[in-house]
Amino acid sequence: MKLVASSSGRIDKLIANALPQYSRAALAKLFEQGLVNLDGITAVKPGHKVREGAMIEVDTSPLEQELQVVELPIIYEDDDVVVINKPAGIISHSRGKFWYEPSVASFLRWHQMGAEYKKNIKGRIIPNAKHTPSHLKTVSYDLDPSLPLESERAGIVHRLDRATSGVMICAKNDNAMAYLQKQFSNRSVKKTYIAIVEGVVEPEEAIIDAPIERNPKKPSEYRVGPRGKSSQTHYKVVKNNEKYTLVEFTPKTGRTHQLRIHSAYIKYPILGDNLYGTAGERLYLHAKSLELKLPDGQLHKFSAPVPKEFDDVL
């Protein structure tokens, strides 16, 4: 942007007065990056004195940041964690700095901001992204990126696929993040999923032990293959009819798309799976419960009710 100095004085103070929506710390970074020009002279310093009428050019693109937020149902919260019931259709985190679709991470960032800061920001309701559920309202905010939790993956301890709903735990500080991630990496977290699969599953209980690898022909997909990573899933039939079966999954490992791939591998794909089965209105896979220790050292179990649409099918 271009601005004309309304009076003489330090260039950093003139810019701060002209751009009150940004913090002094954020504007200081623009000087460090050589993004402030004065009368065509590149990379001036913050303390440079300017005359009235001088032409100042500021590249604010690194500061221009839009945060799109949808309110997500909170199951539990304390000083260290927040546990949510993620709706199907919401991504866990953005795909990059300029990917503005609402996500769990954007909700966390907004949720963590102080009330004093929030009250000075006006949001605007915008049309939902393609996959955002219609019953959720998307609000867009223009934020100062020097605020805490500016990472696109802020607070995300583990992921749920966009199409999967259910329990997801997120960290509110670095210590909680490390404490929780250690449990996921050493596989001490007990995760239980519920799914509707196509067909009448037999046997009614078993362990699927099949390695999973990336599909070289379709890099965004995975498959069972000899060069894959060891992967195990325990399943148990809950109920069925002549077309579908309600199954409870307990994964022993946590590979990408593991439950979807293992279900398809034994010829009972999850209903609505557009990658490994037959596409439908939604993927009938729900993270039902999560059992792990919180930073207080106590074992906790969090549960999310099974969505109504599951009952409509079976």
Image (cartoon, helix red, strand yellow):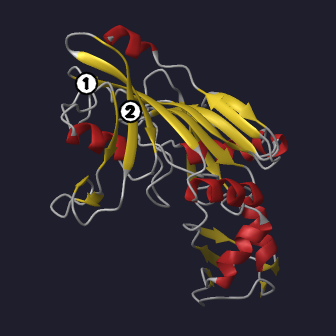
Lateral position of residue 139 relative to residue 135, left or right:
right
Q: Residues within 10 Å of mark 1 (few under 14, many from 20)?
A: many
Q: Is residue 175 visible?
A: yes
Q: How many numbered circles does the render carry?
A: 2
Q: Are marks 1 and 2 in contact (CB under 8 Å)?
A: yes
In the rendered image, the vertical position of residue 205 relative to residue 189, given as above or below: above
Q: Which residue is mark 1?
A: 201
- The residue closer to the viewer here, 215 or 205, is 205
Give the x, y percent position of residue 195: 37, 27
Residue 48 position in % (x across, y down): 78, 87
Give neighbour class at mark 2: few <14, some 14-19, many 20+ (Cα, 10 Å): many
- Spot occupied by residue 134 in the image (x, y as percentages of width and height): 43, 23
**In this view, 303 is above or below 22:** above
Q: Amino acid at mark 2?
A: Tyr
| Helix, strand or loop at mark 1 | loop
Q: Where is residue 206 shown, x and y percent of the image?
A: 34, 35
Q: Amino acid at mark 1?
A: Val
For mark 2, what is the residue?
235
Q: Residue at x 69, y 56 (%)?
A: 177
Q: CA distance from mark 1 to mark 2?
A: 10 Å
Q: Is residue 50 left or right of residue 155?
A: right
Q: Residue at x 59, y 46 (%)?
A: 189
Question: Which residue is rendered at x = 35% and y = 35% of the image?
Answer: 130
